[in-house]
Amino acid sequence: MNIFNGVTQFSIPDRTVVTFGKFDGIHMGHMALINTAGRIAREQGYKLAVFTFDVPPNLHFEKFEGTQITTNYEKRIMFADAGVDYLVEYPFNEETASMEPLEFIKKVIFGNLNAAHVVVGTDWHFGKDRSGNCDVLMAAQKLYNYEVHIVEKEKYEQREISSTWIRGEIQLGNMENVNILLGYPYMIMGRVEEGRHLGKEMGFATVNIYPSPEKLLPPYGVYASKLIVDGNEYYAITNIGVRPTFDDSERISVETHLLNHEENMYGKEVRVELFHFERPEIKFDTVDKLISQVEADIEFTKTFFLL
């Protein structure tokens, strides 16, 4: 996958089928866009392109930390897995935000992206003050030699799936709902770092990662989970939080104990998938009480996964 990050002066040499969006979460609605664009690209012999912004427009002037369902790094991996040939992470700033819709079509869709087909959702807006819409896009398609395809919203239980909805479910810890709306398990990716070996000393060795500051995390606590590394998948329990029993750290950690496997994963990239919120993070009076609770957590998780 070719990536254009933070640049405005480029031109894709291949004709493309391109879809647009913030793609926070890459949920089922987003995948409908990508799959439609991918199908057209295969049928017509074009390349598949995704256009997004390096920083979501609604967050350019606001707090960015702890808001993203999927980080930019996670998005890149998911786009590559979806067969995207070109990923454009366009800079969002005062200059690019001030482009009029027709200027955006001429410079970006026609010039940068070399688009033969444009795939968008029914409510897509672009250009200065979001003044461009599907009608503007379609009115210019003959002039700039592209064809527009409009994809209807995906729904679940008669409600339109949106990143806002999913974000609210994550904040409540409703992982079952989150995973339905995403179409895949909510995940946290990172490189394994060496910890203080506190879990191992208690008999529960853990794989420790530290999430990106931009990542939206569910409530602190224990989750039924899976860990994926080197293409292998392991059942696990995961604690997200600050380890209040030991030091109440300011740094948020994601600590995962594998149920039936143990290996040295230091330095490896892993993906932790969450399936069920078991309990909130607790500060225990003694380490023995913590050990007893972890043992109970493990038994609950085995029951949850029917192990």
Image (cartoon, helix red, strand yellow):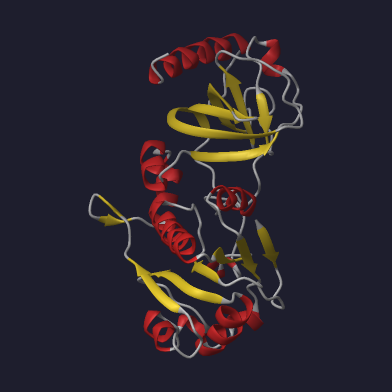
Q: Nearer the viewer, residue 161 or 300?
A: 161
Count of marks placed on residues:
0
Residue 107 lies, in percent from the top left, at 61, 84
Q: Residue at x 44, y 69 (%)?
A: 119
Measured along the vertical axis of the image, is residue 54 above or below residue 199? below
Q: Residue at x 42, y 30 (%)?
A: 276
Q: Indicate left or right for 49 with 300 as reference.
A: right
Q: Nearer the viewer, residue 18 or 277?
A: 18
Q: Residue at x 60, y 70 (%)?
A: 61
Residue 31 lies, in percent from the top left, at 43, 54
The residue furthest left is 158
Residue 285 lies, in percent from the top left, at 58, 16
Residue 231 lies, in percent from the top left, at 60, 30
Measured along the vertical axis of the image, is residue 153 above or below residue 199? below
Measured along the vertical axis of the image, is residue 201 above or below residue 108? above
Residue 36 figure quarter? bottom left
Assign the C terminus to one quadrant of the image: top left
Q: Residue at x 44, y 62 (%)?
A: 43
Q: Nearer the viewer, residue 194 or 96?
A: 96
Residue 14 figure quarter? bottom right
Q: Indicate left or right for 11 with 31 as reference.
A: right
Q: Indicate left or right for 232 with 280 as reference.
A: right
Assign the N terminus to one quadrant of the image: bottom right
Residue 175 figure quarter? top left
Measured along the vertical axis of the image, is residue 172 above or below residue 6? above
